[in-house]
Amino acid sequence: MVAKLTVALQDDGPFRLDVQLSCATGEILALVGPSGSGKSRVLRSIAGLYRPKRGEIINGDEVWYDPAKAVNLTPQQRRVGIVFQNYALFPHLSAIKNVMEALGDRPPSERRARAGELLDLVNLGGLENRNPAELSGGQQQRVAVARALARDPNVLLLDEPFSAVDKATRQRLYRELADLRRQIRMPVVLVTHDLDEAAMLADRLCILHRGRTLQEGPPFDVMTRPATPEIARLVELKNTFEGRVLEHQAGNDRTFFGWGPYTLETTYQPNFPEGSCVTWTIPNARVIIHRPDRPSRGERENPVSGIIMEFVPLGDWTSVAIAVDGLSDSPLFMTVPTHVAHRNDLATGKRINASLLAKGIHLMPLSHEDEA
Amino acid sequence: MNWPSLILSLKLAVWTMVVLLPIGIVLSRQLAWRRFPAKGLVEAALALPLVLPPTVLGFYILITLGGGSPIGQFYDAVLGRSLVFSFDGLLVASVLFNLPFMVLPMRRAFESIPPEVREAAACCGMSAGRILWRIELPLAWPGILSALVLTFAHTIGEFGVVLMVGGNIPGETETIAIAIYDRVQAFDNAAAGLMSAVLLIVALAAIGITYAATSSVGRRNI
């Protein structure tokens, strides 16, 4: 089966929508964006619960939505499984009856057994006869997943399904979703505003902002190589600065650029002509600390020094902001393991030497946000 | 005790509920979930019987349905009898008069169903009819029950409209509320008292049933 979901949606007006995305069978696509970016509207359009002005939704070789050709399949005809943010369980029906309602295609004699199997699949065996109000948030979410899977849907849609449960439950549900996906074969679209969640669960990530899809790709690529400064901001790359390209050395696979008084090197990125201004970014984790007791080759790579202006331990990791010498108005952020921070005696006000790993530096055009 | 009047009132109340229930379900769902042009106008028209003096409403119904009106003439031509001063006329008036009592509680009940629950039902492949039967009605039924009880109690107690449209024909259009008035006018306080007591018990029973039913639903959904 090579069914693939392709979606193109456009809406005008204050709630503009301009979305292109696709999701292959067996793939999890995370749709990520801040609140109000139109994520849920995209999901509802796929389900047939919202009709954008223009666009096309095709699943495999079946056209679900094409207003130009007056095609608009109902949610019933599309066979999508959807898990809503608040689960939207039928409050007056028990867990098993919630699932059985989605098994209307099957002979009545088979429904109870199949619903039981689905509840077992999501580890809810034994709680079949409880009403939603008697289940915890995580259990309700599992009923919703079982109900969504009951129709053998063409597409599984998850609308922020982990936002209403506590952290421990969420971690468990992540693992369960990872297990579950090995057993189901369909495109899965996951809407979330949590980048870590998207990076953990999804095969591909699609960034949505103000109703527009900005970039789509593997999570690591999108989160370390954003196409624009706007996306860099959306994927929370704090280290985003401006610089000027100085020289390309194709043979050495190197591009040199100036950042204040520093000349930094990165991998060969010839799209930006020498002399042009660029925005550049580096993930916090690609800024590494120099250890006075054990010098390493990395110290020759883009060394910078400065004063620690902010030191925030966050459990196992510590966030450090450095006022770089000569560039005190643009702090450089790095994340170090807390034990490393202690061993190196890091603290606010202390001097620190660090390297920016050349491979981690990514160049982008200057910000165009004002035009957007 | 004027048994024919009590039976007539009960019959009128039951028929009003039977006619209004489907109308109310259709109207209240539309008002709860749809946006359409002139929605405000429809809402105002529905609420009008709440504020209009019953005699005024009765007067307009009498004029609209009377023998001189097109509706009255059509009815006479088809069924060979007058619409006003008959049980049929009473029923029409009662249905109109009770519209807000049926629609408003039901509308609130349907409004309280989260839209996602209905959307989830559609995504489960349930047909519109099945969603109504399996999801909407069970979730809205305390409101529907309240609407039925209000309509019932209101029909039993209605005086002005019934008197205007039905006249006061014993056995035909003399409801129990009118009969009580009649007995009081004739200084027959014993009969009036008995009939009033019966109405009081009916009203208490109706309210009791509603409270019992809705509170048990409340416990179930918490």
Image: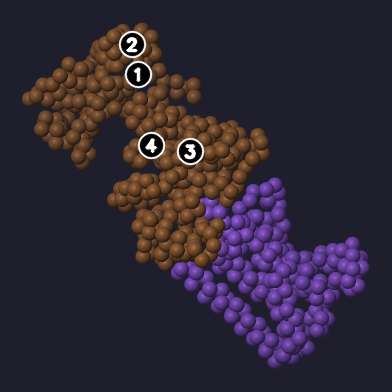
Is disc 3 surrounded by few (<14), some (14 to 19) or many (20+) residues within 10 Å?
A: few
- Picture coordinates of residue A79 (x, y %)? 54, 49
For the residues labelled 1 and 2, say whether their Cβ atoms are less than 8 Å apart. yes
Is disc 2 surrounded by few (<14), some (14 to 19) or many (20+) residues within 10 Å?
A: many
What's the distance in space between the residues labelled 3 and 4, CA to CA? 17 Å
Q: Are marks 2 and 4 on the same chain?
A: yes
Say which quarter of the image contains residue B187. bottom right
- Picture coordinates of residue A270 (x, y %)? 36, 12
- Of residues B186 and A309, the one nearer the viewer is A309
Is disc 4 surrounded by few (<14), some (14 to 19) or many (20+) residues within 10 Å?
A: some
For the residues labelled 3 and 4, say whether their Cβ atoms are less than 8 Å apart. no
Mark toward the start of the polypeptide (1 vs 2):
2
The numbered disc on residue A2 is 3
For the residues labelled 2 and 3, say whether their Cβ atoms are less than 8 Å apart. no
> What hue represents chain B?
purple
Q: Mark 1 — residue?
A: A363
Label 4 or label 1, whichever lies nearer to me, is: 4
The numbered disc on residue A315 is none
Q: Mark 2 — residue?
A: A245
SS category of the residue bearing label 2: strand
Say which quarter of the image contains residue B166. bottom right
Tag 4: amino acid:
Asp
Mark toward the start of the polypeptide (2 vs 3):
3
What's the distance in space between the residues labelled 2 and 4, CA to CA? 33 Å
For the residues labelled 4 and 1, say whether their Cβ atoms are less than 8 Å apart. no
Mark toward the start of the polypeptide (1 vs 3):
3
The numbered disc on residue A203 is 4
Q: Are marks 4 and 1 on the same chain?
A: yes
